[in-house]
Amino acid sequence: MKRKSRMKRKTSETDIEIKFNIDGEGNSEVNTGINFLNHMLESFARHGFFDLEIVAKGDIGVDDHHTVEDVGILMGEAFKNAIGDKKGIKRMSHALIPMDDALATVAIDISGRSYYVLDMQFTKPKVGDLSTENVKHFFESFANSANININANVTGKNDHHQIEALFKAFSKALKDASRIEHNSILSTKGVI
């Protein structure tokens, strides 16, 4: 079973192509036009052992909002497409990841329903070229388009460390929840 997908999304604000392999080796080639987002998505791929290729062109001359949002939407769609009918997956998982002063806790349910909670506070409006307000927007967009639950809490003093711990915890939890453990659909409804 090959759990991978290739997706495209083109709007008047962005033009994005993503290749997502759930059962990869942690390889990535990411170019979103937003350097700090590239770094976070490369970290996501490496720590979750996902193979991820992203080429995104967006109206970053306006700001980074549309690109971050649409990358989140398309990554969620690519994940949803790659995971398929969810037969045999562990479905739920969590990760607790420290990075110096920061601690990120992320719980995931690949439930077929979207819901998103992220509790974290920032001390400044940007880290590098990424607006900190768009970190939350990325995860909300991913959860909604992938139809998964993401419940996360991050504490710390350094915004870079908080964001990086969050992406690492997200990747670890998503990878573990995607793991094939059995031969059935883990739901009393019989579908996820």
Image: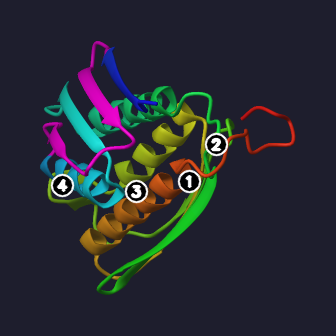
Q: Which marked residue is nearer to the observer: mark 4 or mark 1?
A: 1
Location of residue 143 (image quadrant)? top right
Residue 188 position (above or below residue 19): below
| Dots 4, 2 in contact, CB < 8 A | no
The residue indicated by pointer 4 is 39
Q: How is the image coloured?
A: rainbow
Of the residues tagged 4 and 2, which is closer to the observer?
2
Contact between marks 2 and 3 (CB within 8 A): the answer is: no
The crowding category of the residue bearing disc 1, from other C-alpha atoms within 10 Å (few below 14, some 14 to 19, many at least 20), is many
Q: Which residue is mark 1?
A: 177
Which residue position is annotated with label 2? Answer: 88
- What's the residue at 65%, 36% (across, down)? 87
| CA separation in Å, label 4 and label 2 | 32 Å
Q: Earlier in the sequence, mark 4 or mark 3?
A: 4
Q: Is residue 103 magenta?
A: no
Type of amino acid at the residue the image marks with label 3 = Ser
Question: Of helix, strand and loop, which one carries label 4?
Answer: helix
Q: What residue lies at 64% left-to-right and 56% top-to-bottom?
A: 92
Measure the C-alpha gap from mark 2 to mark 1: 10 Å
**Whole-Å distance between the Cαs marked 4 and 3?**
14 Å
